[in-house]
Image (cartoon, rainbow, N blue to C red):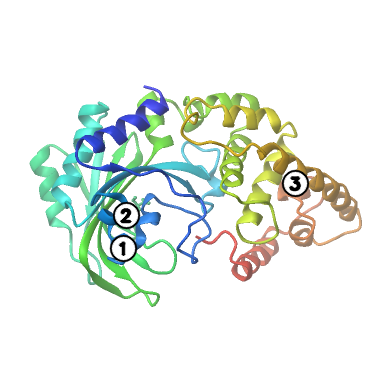
Amino acid sequence: MLSNEIREKFLRFFEKRGHRVVPSASLVPTDDPSVLFTTAGMQQFKSHFIGLRNAKDDFGSLNLTSSQKCVRTSDIEEVGDKSHLTFFEMLGNFSFDGYWKKEAIEYAYDLITKEIDLKIDYVSVFGGEGNVPEDTESAEIWRSIDPEITIKKFGRSDNFWGPTGEEGPCGPTTEIYIDGIEIWNIVFNEYYQSQDKTLIPLKTKGVDTGMGLERLVKVVQKTETVFETDLFLPIVQVANSRIVADHIRTSCFMITDGITPSNTGRGYVLRRLLRRAYVKNKEINPIIDAIVNHPSYLGLYAFTPNTKEVVALELEKFQKTLDAGLKRIGKGEDPFILFTSYGLPLEIIEEVTSVDKEKFERQMAEHKEKSGVWKE
Ligand code: SER
């Protein structure tokens, strides 16, 4: 099954079960200033989960499904391994006081084991922590569906999700694991976490599930990593690098959603991604072609026609900075200044001069704290 068939299967499965298919929102969140990027499918529904808006008025249904474009930069150092990416699509189904745990778990089980024919390694449920009680209801539902299933119990760090940004809806989760990776996160939004971290019970409960399309495709296509799936192979083949493929793909989606390279916020993240990719491979245009013409995206995501121009403009400037920065290295400039002011990627700096890693990390942490960049 190809990635676009898997995406379709997911959306149609829920459509047949009374869900309205909602298009992906922009990568730039419109009503949540506390985050840089859309990091989850539920983000465009944050105000619906807390009762400020009504899903029936806005979308015609209390039950929705979507494939949401997401960017998460927190895992950037892991990109290139089996499953971490800076951009991914999140398949999700959502309910705003429409249905609850039984339906959510049964849908997930049926889709995974019957429609897609995968075998679940184990599932996890919230084991209870602090004021939040153990989720015995979900464990019972799993057992009633499959008495043989392995159920693990974890605490807040594993089986409790949210909020995105500084405050918002959140709650205990039940998660499905296949081939050693977490595939599907089913969140039972029962609380509102305020800025001081207090949990306040929500008036209306909600279901928010998220399954990374790229990971699901890896599991269905039984590939070693996400990069051999049909979603990535044509991109990696021209990029000659997993990291370059990932970073340029993320950049294309960002530019299409109106982000341009700059020194702050989202634009800085885009700049870093482009620069990091460029030092590994200077032939960016063929990679952009492979992404914007990818069969899985055709008819779904219309990339902005000036993507190549935005990238070329940025990288021509970067080449000049690179030349200037490389000259500074000879003059003993602090690696951190070369990194932040000249935009030299650490890989390049390390090649030509010695870097005190501890000092650099310390400077970087302070910088991140100050600029708010990379925070989610
Ligand atoms: N919001 C949850 C997540 O991002 C489930 O969709 O994992």
Alpha carbons under labels 1 and 3: distance apart:
40 Å
Residue under pointer 3: 314
Does any portion of residue 301 appear in the rendered image?
yes
Q: Nearer the viewer, mark 2 or mark 3?
A: 2
Q: Which structural element holds mark 3?
A: helix
Task: Name the image quarter holding residue 160.
Answer: bottom left
Q: Position of residue 157 (x, y in %)?
A: 35, 60
Task: Identify the residue at image location x=55%, y=38%.
Answer: 80
Query: Of label 2 and label 3, which has the lower sequence position?
Result: 2
Q: Which mark is residue 53?
A: 1
Q: Position of residue 170 (x, y in %)?
A: 31, 62
Query: Which residue is at the front of the view, 163 or 174?
Result: 163
Q: Name the residue type under label 2.
A: Asp
Q: Name the residue type under label 3.
A: Glu
Q: Name the residue type under label 1.
A: Arg
Labelled pair 1, 2 in contact (Cβ < 8 Å)? yes
Task: Name the image quarter holding residue 224.
Answer: top left
